[in-house]
Image: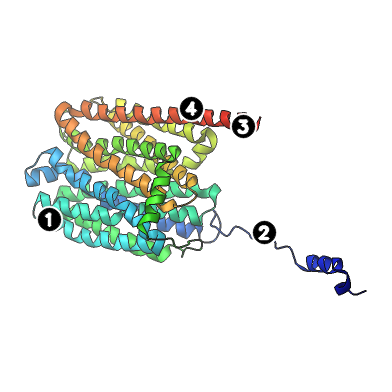
């Protein structure tokens, strides 16, 4: 009897004739694999350009104060305006990256930011300088969230913390080189020439970034509809873990923004009385941040995320207390510890955001970056006000309060995780 006469034989034949598909290999980038080094170096340069431009006036604040005859708190707005502009625009720019692609938005951001950098040295007044810096920060908003979203999509999960750590390491190198270069250049030719030099360096970074960054292979365009964006943001803000990470990033950056906005003023005063070039060289301690950020993955592997955050917070607090001394070596040691603790904490928190968010990664990263740079603006402004009111002790006090906030939030997170595990265990029983 033919298969058509039985029915059962037809089913068996159809079943056996369909091959079982083999599992597709993970084509995302991994250390040692093709394209990973190019990607890492490209994003390293992007992070370097971002921090160099964003904080290009920070080491120059005493000169800007004297040049425009304004106070430290007024001059600090040249930093706060840039970070505030980034904080305000990072979410809209992340939405554009969901629609038009991470690489496209990052490239456009760098082009606009370096173009504005050409105008910054010619600002005729403090208000014009602050306005240009705000626009520059807004332009740079397309980089941080898009970069972490790009990494989350293109890099294998096990390598994500290390990859983001390298991007953050680029931030530290950019922040360091920008401040060191501006310090020595400004000592000879003034702050305007110093800012122009940083702009030229950023142009080179932007060109190399665009040439090196591999085209995305795992990007899926999203929607620009406001309702979709609002729903994604609402879902992220309803996630307690993400909110804790956002707060931790903001508090770490409050410390860092306050310390490095004010340290130049402290070192120009007695008992240090350092020249501008040497003050700029103080920022070589950012190299410590490069190391601590790039090793954050191993730190999390040994201590866990919360253990790494405790260590980062404790290191930062120890550095703040050491910096109270009137001894330059102790102040330098304090800055080293502050920098190491900050960059490690930032790398751990930002990579945890990318791992936690399974959808709308660009928006999740954008919310973190927004909180992070709000913390920078707050630290710059409040740290300068505290310095005006109570000297360096006042600035350190602000920083210690922020570190206490980091530790408190991490403790609350540990308790929440234990409660959740108990609930899951009870449900399973």
Assign the N terminus to one quadrant of the image. Answer: bottom right
Give the secondary structure at mark 1: loop
Q: Is residue 290 visible?
A: yes
Circle 4 residue? 415
Identify which residue is drawn at 19% across, 30% down.
386
Circle 3 residue? 427
Are the residues tagged 1 and 3 within 8 Å (C-beta)?
Answer: no
Most foreground residue, 194 or 411: 411
Residue 77 pos. (x, y %):
17, 44
Identify which residue is drawn at 55% across, 54% down.
30
Disc 1 versus disc 3: distance between alpha carbons? 64 Å
395 up-or-down from 156: above or below: above
In the image, farthest residue toward the right: 1
92 up-or-down from 5: above or below: above
- Count of numbered labels shown in the rendering: 4
Residue 382 pos. (x, y %):
21, 35
Disc 2 versus disc 3: distance between alpha carbons? 33 Å
The dot on residue 23 is: 2
Sequence-first tag of 4 and 2: 2
Circle 1 residue? 123
Give the secondary structure at mark 4: helix
């Amino acid at each position: 009897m033919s298969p058509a006469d039985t029915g059962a034989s037809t089913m068996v034949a159809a079943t056996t004739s369909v091959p079982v598909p083999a599992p597709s290999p993970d084509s995302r980038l991994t250390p040692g694999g093709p394209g990973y080094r190019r990607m890492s170096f490209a994003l390293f340069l992007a992070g370097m350009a971002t921090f160099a431009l964003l904080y290009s006036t920070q080491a120059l604040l005493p000169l800007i104060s004297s040049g425009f005859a304004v106070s430290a708190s007024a001059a600090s707005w040249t930093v706060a305006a840039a970070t505030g502009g980034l904080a305000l625009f990072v979410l809209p720019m992340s939405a554009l990256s969901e629609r038009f692609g991470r690489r496209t938005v990052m490239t456009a951001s760098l082009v606009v930011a370096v173009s504005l950098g050409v105008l910054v040295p010619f600002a005729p007044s403090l208000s014009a300088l602050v306005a240009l810096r705000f626009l520059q920060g807004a332009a740079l908003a397309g980089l941080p969230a898009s970069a972490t979203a790009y990494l989350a999509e293109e890099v294998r999960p096990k390598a994500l913390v290390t990859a983001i750590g390298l991007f953050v390491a680029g931030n530290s190198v950019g922040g360091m080189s920008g401040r060191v270069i501006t310090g020595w250049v400004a000592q000879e030719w003034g702050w305007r020439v110093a800012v122009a030099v940083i702009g030229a360096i950023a142009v080179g970074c932007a060109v190399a970034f665009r040439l090196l960054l591999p085209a995305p292979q795992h990007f899926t365009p999203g929607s620009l509809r406001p309702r979709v964006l609002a729903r994604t943001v609402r879902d992220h803000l309803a996630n307690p873990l993400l909110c804790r990470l956002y707060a931790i990033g903001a508090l770490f950056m409050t410390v860092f923004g306050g310390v490095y906005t004010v340290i130049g003023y402290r070192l120009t005063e007695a008992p240090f009385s350092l020249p501008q070039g040497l003050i700029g060289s103080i920022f070589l301690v950012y190299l410590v941040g490069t190391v601590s950020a790039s090793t954050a993955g191993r730190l999390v592997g040994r201590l866990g995320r919360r253990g790494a955050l405790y260590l980062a917070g404790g290191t930062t607090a120890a550095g703040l207390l050491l910096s109270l001394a009137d001894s330059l070596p102790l102040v330098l040691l304090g800055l080293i510890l502050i920098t190491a603790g900050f960059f490690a904490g930032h790398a751990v928190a930002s990579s945890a955001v990318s791992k936690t968010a399974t959808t709308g990664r660009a928006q999740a990263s954008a919310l973190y970056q927004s909180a992070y740079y709000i913390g920078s603006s707050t630290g710059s402004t409040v740290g300068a006000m505290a310095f005006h009111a109570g000297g360096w002790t006042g600035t350190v006090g602000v920083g210690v309060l922020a570190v206490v906030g980091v530790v408190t939030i991490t403790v609350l997170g540990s308790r929440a995780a234990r409660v959740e595990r108990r609930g899951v265990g009870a449900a399973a029983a």
